[in-house]
Amino acid sequence: MTVAPQPTTGRRLLVVERAYRGSVETQFADVLYLARELNRQQDGLDILLRGLAVTFATADDDAPARSLRIGRIDLDTLPDPRASLRTLLAEGAGVWAEEADLTGLGTAPDRLLPGVRRARPDSRPDWSAYQGVHFL
C-alpha cells in the first residue's frame, strides 16, 4: 500500500467539495482565494478536491474563464479556479483531486493540471498527520 507524503508539522488540509466559482458580489473572495491566504499565513496547507470541485483541477487547454453577460454588460472579473490552483501549487500547496470523482465525471488522467495528484484509495493524504482538517 502506497501512502501519500506526510505533511510537515503545522500544515492543514482543506477539503473542498463544492465547485462554487463566486458571485458578482464576492468576485475576489472565492474558496481558493481563502486557501491562498491560509497557505500564506499558516505554515502551508494541502487541498483535497472532491465532488464537483475536482473540475477546478482539470486542464482546459489554458482557456480563460468565461465572462458572464448581464444585460448589456460583460462581467469578466469572476475568479478563475484553474489559475488560482496554479498559483497555490507555485506557492507550495499540495493539491489532490479525488480519483473516483474524476472518473465519475469522465476526466482522463492526462487532463489534470501539472502538479495535481489523483487521490486514490491507497494514496490519499493521511488526515491524522495534519494539524487540522477543514471543510470549505
Image: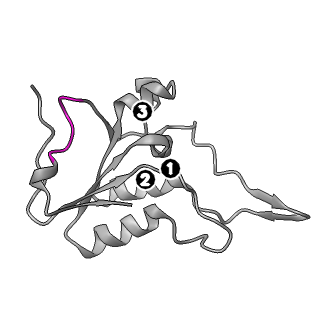
Instruction: Give the quadrant of the C terminus.
Output: bottom left
At mark 1, the secondary structure is: helix
Who's the residue at 52% across and 71% down the image?
Answer: 29
**Span highlighted in magenta in the image:** 121-126
Question: Distance of mark 3 from mark 2, alpha carbons?
Answer: 18 Å
Number of residues whose C-alpha sits closer than 10 Å to that of mark 2, classed few (under 14), some (14–19) or many (20 or more): many
User: What colour scheme has been applied to the protein in the rendered image?
Assistant: one colour
Q: Decide: is 3 above or below 18.
A: above
**Which amino acid, mark 3?**
Asp
Residue 85 appears at what percent x and percent y? Answer: 43, 53
- Can you say whether 25 is above or below 59 in the image? below
**Which label was assigned to residue 134?**
none
Q: Do the residues labelled 2 and 1 touch (CB within 8 Å)?
A: yes
Q: Mark 3 points at which residue?
A: 101
Query: Label 1 amino acid?
Result: Arg
**Does dot 3 land on a helix, a strand or a loop?**
helix
